Image: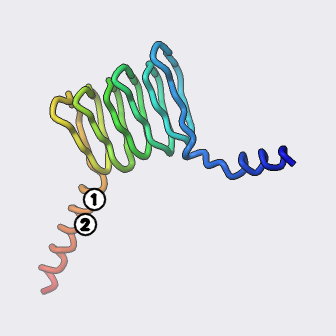
């Protein structure tokens, strides 16, 4: 009876809600692919790809590439960062490299030394301009 209950819990578990943690003092070199969220207090040198949210703590450091749905950064990031939805940079964040995001929020005090493309805003702006030009020509 109890074993059936445990099975049903595992089957209904949503991997997008599971959280992975890289603790302070831990260094990982390599690539990580996951569906759950991450909290990073240690160091990652490589590529992190996840469909969840990434929280980079004050002691955390990522050198390489990262792709995720949402990100909340307090630590250091160096490399290429792609956030599909919202990237939030806290006052202690230090970012270098290339950033592609849907939305960007930066607290005062954050170091942001990167090229930045906001994919959804740029696309909509260009589409609006094209539509207006076409309307002006046909009128």
Residue 127 badge = 2
Q: How is the image coloured?
A: rainbow
In terms of image quadrants, where is residue 17? top right
Q: SS for tag 1?
A: helix
Whole-percent x, y for residue 127 in the image:
25, 66
With respect to residue 105, does 73 lie above or below? Answer: above
Above-or-below relation of 91 to 35:
above
Dot 2: element: helix
> Which image quadrant is residue 74 in?
top left
**In this view, 121 is above or below 3:** below
Front in this rendered view, residue 139 or 57: 57
Asked if the residue at tag 1 contacts the one at tag 2, i.e. Cβ–Cβ closer than 8 Å, the answer is: yes
> In percent of the image, x 21 and y 62: which residue is there?
125
Which residue is painted at 26% across and 25% down in the image?
94
Q: Which disc, if any, is residue 112?
A: none
In this rendering, position of residue 121 left or right of residue 28: left
The correct choice, above or below, for 112 with respect to 8 in the image is above
Q: Residue at x 33, y 23 (%)?
A: 58
Q: Nearer the viewer, residue 21 or 31?
A: 21
How many marks the image carries: the answer is: 2
Q: CA distance from mark 2 to mark 1?
A: 6 Å
Lateral position of residue 2 relative to residue 80, left or right: right
Q: Which of the numbered marks, if any, corresponds to residue 123? A: 1
Return the x and y of residue 62 as percentages of the image width and height. Answer: 40, 24
Label 1 Cα crowd, 10 Å radius (few <14 / some 14-19 / many 20+): few
């Amino acid at each position: 009876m109890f074993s059936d209950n445990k099975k049903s819990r595992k089957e209904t578990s949503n991997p997008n809600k599971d959280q992975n943690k890289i603790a302070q003092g831990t260094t990982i070199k390599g690539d990580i692919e996951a569906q759950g969220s991450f909290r990073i207090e240690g160091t990652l040198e490589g590529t992190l790809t996840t469909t969840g949210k990434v929280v980079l703590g004050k002691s955390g450091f990522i050198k390489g590439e990262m792709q995720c749905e949402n990100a909340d950064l307090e630590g250091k990031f160096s490399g290429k960062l792609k956030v599909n939805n919202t990237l939030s940079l806290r006052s202690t964040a230090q970012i270098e490299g290339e950033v592609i995001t849907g939305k960007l929020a930066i607290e005062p005090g954050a170091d942001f030394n990167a090229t930045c493309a906001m994919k959804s805003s740029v696309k909509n702006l260009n589409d609006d301009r094209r539509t207006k030009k076409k309307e002006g020509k046909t009128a």
